[in-house]
Amino acid sequence: AQKITQTQPGMFVQEKEAVTLDCTYDTSDPSYGLFWYKQPSSGEMIFLIYQGSYDQQNATEGRYSLNFQKARKSANLVISASQLGDSAMYFCAMREYDYKLSFGAGTTVTVRA
Amino acid sequence: DTGVSQDPRHKITKRGQNVTFRCDPISEHNRLYWYRQTLGQGPEFLTYFQNEAQLEKSRLLSDRFSAERPKGSFSTLEIQRTEQGDSAMYLCASSFLTSGSGTGELFFGEGSRLTVL
């Protein structure tokens, strides 16, 4: 079974607007972590934001925030004030007890000027 | 530069040839991971090491694939008798864990792209 599901293959967003990328996950482990990575066309994976399963507050890092809804098993990424440089592939990933990450299929974001 | 480095960045080979990729992790990191990524997909886990011990191998890793991490430093991933289906980006990542604590964030290299003709 898929551990991470990203249902949006591609999204377009206007510059300076916000965009929400969906991510749902499946685990029976009570202790887990959720990550978002950005992969530009150059190929490197860039860490954006982390949410632990026991964290009470939603994580924020600059223009990135994670909307964590534990009961619904969702961890959506919100990018505010989109910039042209945000155009990339975005991956949601989950860490379980063994500390390896399982990735979703990704969402391509294209920011329009 | 003290990040994760991978070599070569690009490799084109003919079907049936052997290829080897090298990964140098961040020096103090005790965990090293190999992932494979095909076009338009997310990275798929292949194997990982804690220090020099290989702790898990995915079922994706056929007998033609072997990975080593001698002395717990750099790692190599060898693919024998390459097939066209092996064409992909091979990503290496490292992390530092103590006593099972920490976020588990992976630091990735830029990847080694393999094309099998």
Image: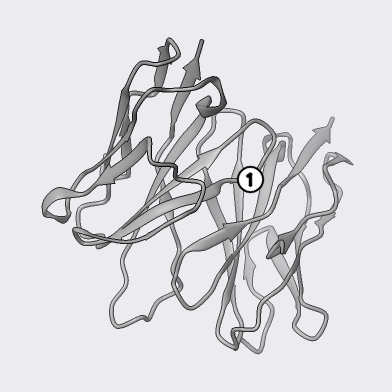
Question: A20 or A54: nearer the eye?
Answer: A54
Q: Is residue A65 above or below residue A11?
A: below
Where is residue A100? Give x, y as percent.
46, 64
> Which quarter shows the N terminus of chain B?
top left
Where is residue B31? Give x, y as percent.
30, 61
Where is residue B5? Give x, y as percent.
31, 37
Q: Secondary structure at mark 1?
A: loop
The residue that appears at 59% across and 84% down in the rendered structure is: A29
The residue that appears at 31% across and 41% down in the rendered structure is: B66
As drawn, which residue projects farthest toward the left? B71
Q: Is residue B79 left or right of residue A90?
A: left
Residue placed under numbered mark 1 in the picture: B42
Question: A73 or A40: nearer the eye?
Answer: A73
- Disc 1 packing (10 Å; few <14; some 14–19; many ≥20): many
Kind of residue indicated by mark 1: Gly
Label 1 chain ID? B
The residue that appears at 83% across and 45% down in the rendered structure is: A16
Q: Is residue A76 above or below residue B103?
A: above
Question: A64 or A102: nearer the eye?
Answer: A102
The residue that appears at 47% across and 25% down in the rendered structure is: B113
Q: Is residue B67 left or right of residue A35?
A: left
Quadrant housing residue A9? top right
